[in-house]
Amino acid sequence: MKPFSIWWKRLFDWLPAIVTIVALVVAWEVLVDVLDVQRWLLPAPSVIAAEISDEFGFLMKHARVTLSETIVGFAFSVGLAVILASGIIWSRTVERSVYPLIITSQTIPIITLAPLLIIWVGTDMRSKVIVIVLFTFFPIVISLVSGLRSVDQEMVDMFRTMGASSWQTFRKLMIPAALPNFFAGLKVAAVFSVIGAVIGEWFGASAGLGWLMKIAGGQFQTARIFAAIVVLSILAMLLFAAVVAIEKWVLRKYPPTADRVIRLGDS
Amino acid sequence: MSSARPNTDTRANDGALGIAENALVSVSGVGFDYEDAPILEDVSLTVERGEFVALVGPSGCGKSTILNLISGVLSPRNGTVSANGLSNRSERLGNVSYMQQKDLLLPWRSVAENSRLGLELRGVGSVESGAAVAELADSFGIADVLDSMPWQLSGGMRQRVALLRAVLPDNPVLLLDEPFGALDAITRRSLQQWLLNVLDTDNKAVVLVTHDVEEAILLADRVLVMSSNPGQIIDEVVIDLSDAEASGDLTTAPDFIELKKRILSSLDDQETVR
């Protein structure tokens, strides 16, 4: 009885999203039909669905390539961000020398850099990983630094009066306190990493969904482009869901101070 | 409550090194600035082993700053501070117990894990520190909640845990900064009584900061009254309630009320000066 009602509640929570999506898809289908839009210009949802089911194996083969690039790139990005954020927290010199550089790196349109990266390191996975890292380390660094700095000065002083070393304060106080912010950055980066992989593939690859979209675009196979977009969205959502699942598991062990969702408008 | 021992005016002790050597806490001629504004000017006080001293004064008079100086969190502009024989500021960190007004419990740690934090930071293993917590949990009234998380506890219970955490490393100097300031009046009364029973004050020097004059009289052997802008010690009142204790209810005893009047008038004097 109870699991049943939980499922109903979940379905009810998702209902607004489901209704919105269904309404949009129906409107799209109807408009394409009524206005007689050419297939190569904008295929109807039914055509895209047919493309996905017809070419499922082919799409999955390229999705696997993109997914592995994404995961490797994301992992490198998290590693780099943790090192940079820790350095910024530990040393004022590191902060002063590295922080402006990090911000400058984000003002470079990475799309213009991607073709150069292909020339420098080749068309293998490395160029995609570099693009993903450039694309995603920034939100993680920013959120992690602000998380580590979110600790109350009183808490830090309390640790000091107990004779804690800097390392003990970092490990037992600052890291657990930074986790909610850290995961906020991770969630943004997880979605961005998929986009980074596609940009990397766009400029030089022999496989992957980005490469597939570029080739299909040249051949006016618009339905295939949309099919690839659908698969990419699902990939990004799965990655996001994975990060959320890890977040829930970790924050159950290290609950943050404010254990509630703040939403303006609810009275 | 041990009866107060005779003590001379603290300002007369300036530079008297003999006194400082016997005392567990010794603050001498201390000044402290915060962002170029003088917070404390020429503050001197000593606390001996077995003595419980309360600092009362208006908010912003620098009461808590004195505790931060004694604990080693802050350095004075001039003057000397020593606690437990340690006059080097950084050596005092970790060797003076300090309980703040906020409980500052880590939300991701259970009551037992929070209580043993001080021992853990000293490198005491979890088995040994866990045993130390278990030993005192009963008298601190938290034996039933050792596995609970801080958010499940009432304000009074959280303060008990915070006090246990401060006391467990067993430093001879204990600083209490408004330990019950955030609690309702009823809980505060019962915890004040409880504090006297649970603390082994005979071997400690305790400094309590409070704005509650009754709390100061109830708990302390000696009350130092402070003024603000800049913070200075302007009066010292020795608390001897041995007659009143015999009569039952302390807070309505004539001696108690007399002491309260005396301290409040000291506070009022400088209130009008401002």
Image (spheres, coloured by chain):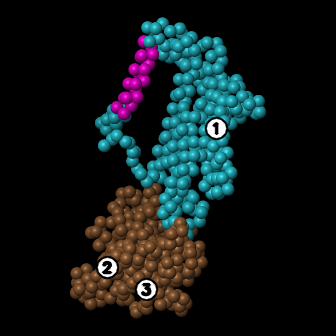
Chain colours: A cyan, B brown
Chain assignment, label 3: B
Can residue B217 be seen? no
| Residue position for label 3 | B50
| Residue position for label 2 | B264
Q: Is residue B69 above or below residue A119?
A: below
The residue shown at (47%, 87%) is B11
Can residue A136 be seen? yes
- On whether residue B171 falls in the magenta region, the answer is no
Left or right side of A92 for A13: left
What is the distance, in whole Å, between disc 2 and disc 3 at their CAs? 26 Å
Q: How far across and down, in percent of the image, does residue B269 sit?
A: 34, 79
Same chain letter for marks 1 and 3 = no
Chain assignment, label 1: A
Left or right side of A99 for A44: left
**Amino acid residing under circle 2:** Leu
SS at badge 1: helix
Q: How far across and down, in percent of the image, does residue B35 sit?
A: 53, 66
Same chain letter for marks 1 and 2 = no
Q: Between residues A73 and A37, which one lies in front from this camera angle?
A: A37
Which image quarter: residue B7? bottom left
